[in-house]
Amino acid sequence: MMNEQIASLHAQITAAEHRVHNLQTQSETLTNELRAFKAEYDQRIAPYNERLKMVEDTIRELKQQLMYQQGGWQPPAGYVSVEEQYARAWTKPNHDPDYSTPQFDPLPDIPTPQIPKDDIRTLYRRLARAYHPDHASDDRDRDYRHQVMAQINDAYANQDIRTLHNLARQKDRIDVETPIQDIELRELEAVYNQLRRRIFQLKQQIFELKNCDLMQLKVEVSVARARGRDMLGEMAEQLEATYRQHLQELYQLRREL
């Protein structure tokens, strides 16, 4: 029964590892696509958005100044007008925050048990040197080493390299009270549960990547491009037209001041 559970877990772990690999590849592909599109968007659209935002802020401030002039409003010490802020910031525009590439914390590594790459005879000799009763420090330690060597000798007699691997993987002190199969089963269950958590996290990442604002815009641009339209070019033209309209309003406000 225990051997069947172990074999089943090995099969589930192999399938889960393939699933993780496929999902991770999909997540990386989506991320790279978004980064490439974000670079194009930043080059063609973000400067227009930044410039438009600055002129809108300037108009808003000038309207406030006109309103406050009637009440004798004076700017406080250290006051910097939006026009001046615009002049300072325009040489180094910021990215549009509405279309940022989703960022994720790195996923933790899955602690896969380290299996020594030894043949069965080399592995047996290494374990025998480490746990031989002749190296005992006292009678209690000698009894413990006899029990461990009994497991080692039994595994070697049956040419059971998996059990020898499990014994070698145990750190510091081998648990002679717990059957080796129980230890292996617990280790495999831990690895499988880690893989299941990784699959869940990757699915969440893929969902967020597929449904973020940047991806929605990318899809719309791709559909328009397939129909012969340059959607980003149209957006740039519209933003430029709006910017020029705002400039006319800004000039009018300055004359009134």
Image (cartoon, helix red, strand yellow):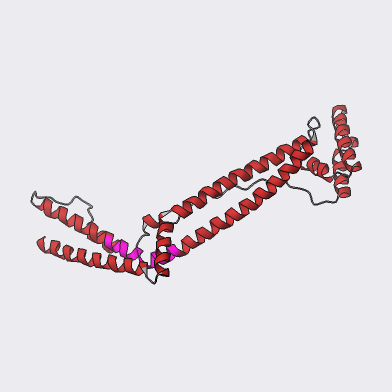
Magenta stretch secondary structure, dominant: helix
191 sits left or right of 229 in the view: right
Where is the C terminus found, in terms of image quarters? bottom left
- Does residue 168 lie above or below 87 as drawn? above
Q: Is residue 92 visible?
A: no
Q: Give the image location of residue 230, x and y in percent.
A: 37, 70
Residue at 56% in and 57% down: 26
Range of magenta residues: 37-52
Q: From the viewer's perspective, is 219 left or right of 194?
A: left
Pick the front one: 212 or 108: 212
Residue 231 at x, y percent in the picture: 36, 67
Q: Residue furthest front?
A: 227
Q: Which of these two is toward me, 138 or 173?
A: 173
> Which x, y percent locates residue 113?
72, 45
In this view, the residue farthest toward the bottom is: 228
Please name the residue shown 88% across and 36% down the image: 149
Q: Nearer the viewer, residue 233 or 180?
A: 233
| Quadrant of the image occupied by residue 22 | bottom right
Q: Residue at x 19, y 58 (%)?
A: 59
Q: Residue furthest top?
A: 140
The N terminus: image quadrant: top right
Residue plotted at (86% across, 36% down): 151
Image coordinates for residue 111, horizontal then vertical, percent:
67, 45
Answer with left or right where residue 101 lies relative to residue 181.
left
